[in-house]
Every structure is written in structure tokens, then in C-alpha cells.
Image: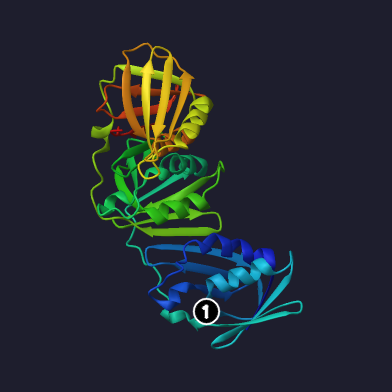
Amino acid sequence: MKIITDRENLLEPLQKISGVVERRQTLPILANILVNAGNGNIQLTATDLEVELKTEAKVECDGEADFTIPARKLLDICKALPESAPITLDVSEDKVKLQSGRSRFTLSLLPARDYPVIEPTPSNSVMSINEATLNRLIEKTQFAMAQQDVRYYLNGMLLEINKGDLRTVATDGHRLAMSQSTKSVPEEISQQLILPRKAVIELGRLLADRDGDIKIEMSNNYIRVLLEKAVFTSKLIDGRFPEYQRVMPTGSDKEVEADRANLRQSLTRASILSNEKYKGIRFDLKENLLQLQAHNPEQEESEEELEVKYSGDELKIGFNVGYLLDAINAIGEESIIIELKDTNSSALIYGKDNSESRYVVMPMRI
């Protein structure tokens, strides 16, 4: 069977699904993508047994065929071809011959029947949400997810739906990020889902700032997101997410207001000489003045002074500068509020006049 298309038509769906394909696979077939061709259309499927993504493209084909083809090799070939280059795939039993101009490639195939496809349990909740809204919620919080933590439920993001509000929460035990959109989903749905880290990252890549709605189907152990020309499916983490509301600081009696750009630049400069492992930086707060100090084992030091709005008692407190910068980079407002209590209490950081996104950073001893 022959499939005729052009470079861009094949490259776009390949780039979409390439992130799902793991470079190191326990099963050789997982390095391939499943191709279902027929009726002038090809559907491409990639999975790592936890996340699955399907995309499609219009092509010319003279029959029907199902096969799996090496994902990385096919993507690299398409990238290396000239723009708008015509592509012909001649599919036989165990090989595909790819021809484009004077270039020819022969790739080995594996049987489609051996390809694992995720079969989600029937959904118990279905909802529509604005694509740009979900994209923003993921962007504002995904950086705080843990990586390879033994507390497996931290290696992902909480998606909480309650009384019409949608909230995303991520924490690695040292900092927490929370963002919400009020009255954006059906009020009758009440659900808590923990999406795996890889699913969150891939979903963040797929989503765009489009105004249209997307459909989300949820069951006890799967989530499925129906996008334009793509269907994204992921297993959920089976666990109990920490009660994040308890972590949110209360009773803070000190409030610092700072210019976001100036604070970020000062933190970035001061961090150059911080300890590379612990990334500690000390806040020394005085009336309308914030001093930032960092040092490292080589006895090198850096110090920055920054004018802020602050009228509370003097306070010295240490933080991981990387965690502070992550939170500040996620905030869009020009002015930042940092609420503090004492040297042993976490900081609450948010944009001025913005109650939708909140960031908590634990203090550290320096």
C-alpha cells in the first residue's frame, strides 16, 4: 500500500506525539508509533503505557494498513527533508520504503497487533473548559511538581473541581503552587484527580491560548482530553494528595510589596554567588528596604539592596532562591506581595490584586 503526503503534513502530527515516546524503553515496540491508514486519513498513536496521544492527518492512500514504525527515525527523516518535500510511503509486510525526491529510506516495521493501546474505564464525568484557561492553570503551577519523590503522589499535579471552580495544585514538599479559575466548569461536578508529571508536561505542550472549549472525560483511573486533531489519554496517580489548604500560611503580619522585575533581577544577581547545592539567600528586611545576601563555601559573598514597601518589624529569613524565582516568573502582575510571619514560617507570594494564583515557599536556615 502507498501513502502519499508532504513533509509539513506529516511533520506536525509527528512533533506533537514525539514527546510521549520514551527514548529508553523496556518494550522495543514502545519506541514505535502506531499508524492506522485508510479512507484518505492516517491516525498516529504514541504511548509509554502511562500516557497515550493520538493525532491524525489527511493523506492520499490506495487502501488500508495498520503498522508500527520507529518514531524517532521517522521524525528525524522528516525534519531533514526540504520544506514542502513530497513523501511517499510504500508499505509492505515488515518494511516501509520512504521516498522523497532523490532520497530513499527503508525502515523496519513491527506488527500493529502487538502495539499496546490504553483502554480507559468508562468516564463518570464529562465537562467542557476553555482551552486557554486550562493552559494558564498548568503554566502557573507545573514547575512545583516533585521529580522522582518516594511520595509518588507528589510527582504530579492535583486537578480539583469543586462548585464550578477548577484548581491546579503542585508541591514537592518544599514549595507549593496553586492556581484557580472560578465558575469555569459545571457546578455539579466534584472531583480530585492527580495527573502524572509526564502527562502534565505533555498536556502543557499540546494546549494553546485558544478561546475555544475542549472536552475532558474523567473516570476513577483515567483522564481523556479531546483537542483539535488530537486525543490525549493518561492514567491517574492512585493516591491521596496532601491537604494543601493546611500549608497555606495564615496569620502573617508582615507584608512586603516589591516591583516584580526589580526583585527578579536582584535575586538573579545575588544568586550567582550562592551555594550551588542549597541555593540559599537571606532576606534582611528593614523599613522600605530589602537586603539580599548570599555566600558559598569558597567564602565569596554577594549583596543586593532593593527599595520595597514595608513598614513592619525588622526580619531576617532565608529561602531557596530558585524556588523564589520560579514563583516570581509565574506571576504576571508588575507588583508582587510577599507575606511573612517569622523566621520559621513559610512565605506566601502572589501578584498584587490577584487572588487566582498563590505560591508558598518554606524558609531555610542559612
Q: Quadrant of the N terminus?
A: bottom right
Q: Residue furthest front?
A: 299
Residue 184, given in percent of the width and then of the height, sits at 43, 36
**Residue at the (57%, 75%) spot, across then down:** 37
Looking at the image, which is closer to me, 179 or 320?
320
* Image coloring type: rainbow
* Quarter occupied by residue 6: bottom right
121 sits left or right of 216 in the view: left
Residue 365 vertical position relative to residue 191 in the rendered view, above or below:
above
Query: Is residue 329 visible to the viewer in this orientation of the structure?
Result: yes
Q: Residue furthest bottom?
A: 93
Q: Residue at x 37, y 63 (%)?
A: 50
Q: Residue at (46%, 50%) from the top-left corner?
A: 215
* Crowd band around label 1 with a 10 angstrom C-alpha radius: few (<14), some (14–19), many (20+): some
Q: Is residue 182 visible?
A: no
In this view, 73 is above or below 124: below
- Residue type at mark 1? Asp
The residue beneath circle 1 is 66
Seen from the viewer's position, the closer of residues 201 and 287 is: 287
| Front residue (pair 295, 364) | 295
Give the number of marks. 1
User: Quick one: quadrant of the C terminus?
Assistant: top left
Q: Position of residue 232 (x, y in %)?
A: 45, 58
Q: Position of residue 10 (x, y in %)?
A: 63, 67
Q: Secondary structure at mark 1?
A: strand
User: Image quarter for residue 302?
Assistant: top left
Q: Name which residue lies at 40% across and 32% down.
A: 294
Q: Nearer the viewer, residue 49 or 75?
A: 75
Q: Is residue 136 left or right of residue 187?
A: right
Residue 264: percent from left, percent from top: 49, 30
